[in-house]
Image (spheres, rainbow, N blue to C red):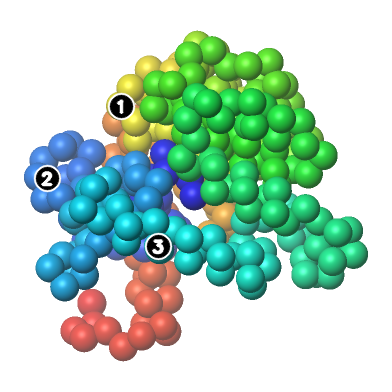
Amino acid sequence: YIPYKQFALRNYYQWGMPSNKAWDKLMLKECNDQAAWRQPYQHHPAEMLFDLQSDPFELNNLATDPEYESVLRAFRGAVSENIRRTRDLGLFIPSSREGVNLYDKVIQENYPLEELYSMAELAGTAEKKDLPSLLKALNSSEPDIRYWAAVGFGHLASKGNLDKAPGELLKLLEDANPYVACEAAYAVSYTEDAEKGVKRLVFPSNEEDRKIGYAMLESLSLDHTKRHLIQPYISELTEKAASLPAKENEDSGLMARGILVNMGSLNIDDQHGASSYEQGLKLNRGRRPMKPTP
């Protein structure tokens, strides 16, 4: 649903493993030419369709192949129908889930689920003709719908189909909901007002929301065309990387170091704390048998 984001970002323990750090080094130095290894660092398409018999590693996306158009349409319809039939609540942003039973909330507030589903489906495939619908959704009273509208603008902007950020999108940089504000900032980062977007991601409105902006900034820093916008904030990020307290799986300092690694300002070996390797081994051993054990 968010195709302009990379397939994967670093997490607290896994990327402290020697194999993952070696993988990171190869990719960031552009020394690897294997498609399967490059995939996690790349933006993923809005829709993907694979022939698992002939392509078990899912490297040849058939979604744009005219020969498979009917198959793609059938699967697309099946997913859309299933979301509505089951009243899927997976498209709500994290803040909407805090302190509430989301199922009860949706029923009690008569939440406009169809509007949410339609906007999320539109976001990843939006074209210029969809701008009126996206603009209208930016003004929704529901933060989840504003969020997906911002995703739609991010998709358009990252594809080069939105040069100037509309006033409604710029206004969302000050949205009370940090997920909405940061998604809007990411979209703005691909327009003529890019500096405003990046600045919003670097400097959160509230300290507890810093990791939301940093997560977006880490994704942005993997885009070679956007690194010059982050460069002026290297000192700020370096200071935060060193001073922010470590919180397992919610470490803004780790994210700051990840951004610095992507920018070439920090060695990947210095991204994780000294204990991350042992923590990773302990967690992995508890999840599944490892043969041979590292």
- Say which mark, if any, is on residue 97: none
Q: Secondary structure at mark 2?
A: loop
**Image position of 199 (left or right of 1):** right
**Rounded to the nearest whole Å, what is the CA distance between mark 2 and mark 3?**
36 Å
Tell me the kind of residue under disc 1. His
- Density class for disc 1 (Cα within 10 Å; few <14, some 14-19, many ≥20) is few
Residue behind mark 3: 74
* Mark found first going from the N terminus, 3 or 1: 3
User: Residue 79: image x %, image y %?
Assistant: 49, 64
Is 78 placed above or below 139 here?
below
Circle 3 sits in a helix, a strand or a loop, which is it?
helix
Which label's residue is closer to the chain start, 1 or 2? Answer: 2
Q: Nearer the viewer, residue 164 or 227?
A: 164
Q: Residue at x 54, y 48 (%)?
A: 121
Residue on which the image places disc 2? 32
Q: CA separation, marks 3 and 1?
A: 36 Å
Quadrant for the C terminus in the image: bottom left
The label nearer to you, 2 versus 3, is 3
The disc label shown at residue 224, or none? 1
